[in-house]
Image (tube, grey):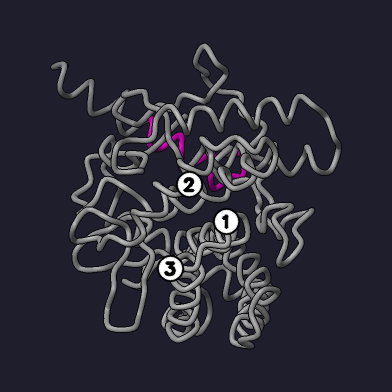
Amino acid sequence: MSPKIVGNLLFRSRQMWYWLKMLAGKSYHRKPQNLGRVFEPNKLAGYFNDLTGKILWTGEIDADGVPVNTLSNGRKFQFPILITQKALGHWDRWLAEKDDKDKQQFLILCNWLLEHQDESGGWDTWQPFQRPQHSKYSAMTQGQALSVLSRALKLTNDPRFQQAAEKAFDLFLIGAEEGGVTYFEGDAVFLEEAPSQPRNTVLNGWIFALFGLYDYNLAIDQAGAGELFERSIDTLAQHLAGYDSGYWSYYDSQKHISSRFYHSLHISQLKALSLISENRVFEKYHQRWTSFEDGFINRTRAFAVKAFQKLKEPARITIVK
């Protein structure tokens, strides 16, 4: 066989193995994420989402112990979303168990963020995937980095973490079409996990980004962050119905159905939003989507639709390790 055919077979086999592990619930990238175990509304304490499962990384690491990922095309890179989530997992376990090893790991990952933040204040998230995004940045990355840096500042009082957080926040003020991570549409504010045209706002990424602004405002009391958070959470409340299929949640605003992992994640995220917001729409959809998850017919239908969509629109490049 020609090298090209062999390369394509390896590429597809890596993707197939990745999806089989996810469907079996054995993927590191799909560990359950419930409401944060030590989350306290209106306090910069535990994270809103339980990321302690992210601590259990068994893959490749660099000389400092920071995870190294492998893509389905064989390329190795360090994924900033994984790194921020692992940091938040260590933070929460340190709060719960007071093991200094978790604090040390948290600070190692915080230092990685300092060392890899670029001049614009961001972390390149999408270029390795060769996706046609407007921006190489992600509001999810920027938001979770804000959540990490805000806690690092609280822990150490090191001004470098505040400076890095301020730079990270600046990208939220730049339109996605200009290389930032936000779409401003009149009074509406959409926080984009993967900025693209046309806009396709990923629900879970939007909420992760929202909590980054929330945490940053708690840490710094930054008026601009508080205002942007309020505008965007109001936008989410107004558009949440658009993520409801009638039997399951949609993953994004272009109506791709959620996998069971993401549907469960949406439920947990909505519960957290209901605890920090007086808007009852978040509790309404938390209860509604919980009832969807409890229904066997709903789960089966969602699985079938998701499988069809994956076959119709397979990802070109994915993380396999």
State the predominant SS element of the stretch in magenta.
helix
User: Gap between marks 1 and 3, in whole Å?
Assistant: 37 Å
Q: Secondary structure at mark 1?
A: helix
Amino acid on which the number 1 mark rests in the picture: Ile
- Residue kind at label 3, given as amino acid type: Ile
In x, y percent, where is residue 87?
61, 37
Residue at x-position 34% and y-position 31%: 72
Q: Position of residue 251 (x, y in %)?
A: 44, 66
Query: Does residue 127 appear to the left or right of 268 in the view shown?
Result: left
First in sequence: mark 1 or mark 3? 1
Q: Residue at x 65, y 32 (%)?
A: 106
**Relative to residue 37, is residue 157 depicted above or below?**
above
Q: Secondary structure at mark 3?
A: loop
Which amino acid, mark 2? Ala
Foreground of the two, 208 or 8: 208
Q: Tell me where the magenta segment starts and ends, as one range.
A: 14-26
Distance of label 2 from label 1 (alpha carbons): 9 Å
